[in-house]
Amino acid sequence: QVQLVESGGGLVQPGGSLRLSCAASGSIFRVNTMGWYRQAPGAQRELVATISSSGSTNYADSVKGRFTISRDNVKNEEYLQMNNLKPQDTAVYYCNADLWDNYMLLRNYWGQGTQVTVSS
């Protein structure tokens, strides 16, 4: 059984910063691509950023230059450093990962989500 658990969300003023973390645990053989997605009220879930196992990154245009995704392959964790936050960044942020479990099955997993609210 595999779990992704996010932490680090909260309330922040415009222009502020937050750092999200996601820890993958359980019967994991190898974690491939990891990513962050977000879903605002009334909107579809959208890609924020992804990072491959080798460290290649991809960002949504709306967060380029403000957000940085990183990972620790030893700990099976990923992070999202969010700077210069804007009210339109308000959403539930979800951790996502493609990973091989100990049964050598490649599956996609989601975390439970963490709320980020940007407001004065």
Image (cartoon, rainbow, N blue to C red):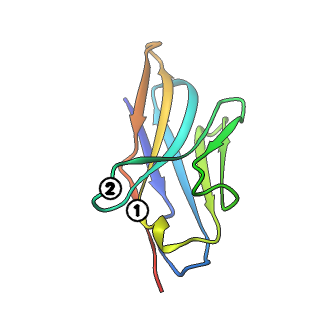
Q: Nearer the viewer, residue 55 or 30?
A: 55
Residue at 37% x, 48% y is 45
Q: Which residue is mark 2?
A: 43
Q: Name the residue type under label 2.
A: Ala
**Which picture quadrant has residue 91?**
bottom left
- Looking at the image, which residue sits at the far top? 104
Q: Position of residue 19 (x, y in %)?
A: 59, 62
**Which picture quadrant has residue 35?**
top right
Q: Is residue 89 above or below residue 24?
A: below
Circle 1 SS class? strand
Q: Is residue 95 above or below residue 62?
A: above
Q: Name the residue type under label 1.
A: Ala
Query: How many numbered tags mark residues here?
Result: 2
Q: Position of residue 63 (x, y in %)?
A: 60, 57
Q: Position of residue 104 (x, y in %)?
A: 47, 12
Q: Could you give the CA–CA distance between mark 2 and mark 1, rounded to whole angstroms? A: 9 Å
Per the rendering, the mark at residue 55 is none
Q: Are marks 2 and 1 in contact (CB under 8 Å)?
A: yes
Q: Nearer the viewer, residue 19 or 50?
A: 50
Q: Which residue is mark 1?
A: 91
Residue at 66% x, 55% y is 64
- Looking at the image, which residue sits at the far bottom? 120
Residue at 37% x, 29% y is 1
Using residue 111 as the reference point, say whether residue 98 is left or right of it. right
- Whether residue 61 is visible to the viewer of this picture, yes or no, is yes
Q: Is residue 117 above or below residue 38?
A: below
Disc 2 residue crowd, few under 14, some 14–19, many 20+, Cα 10 Å: few
Q: Is residue 117 above or below residue 74?
A: below
Q: Position of residue 9 (x, y in %)?
A: 47, 65
- Whether residue 10 is visible to the viewer of this picture, yes or no, is no
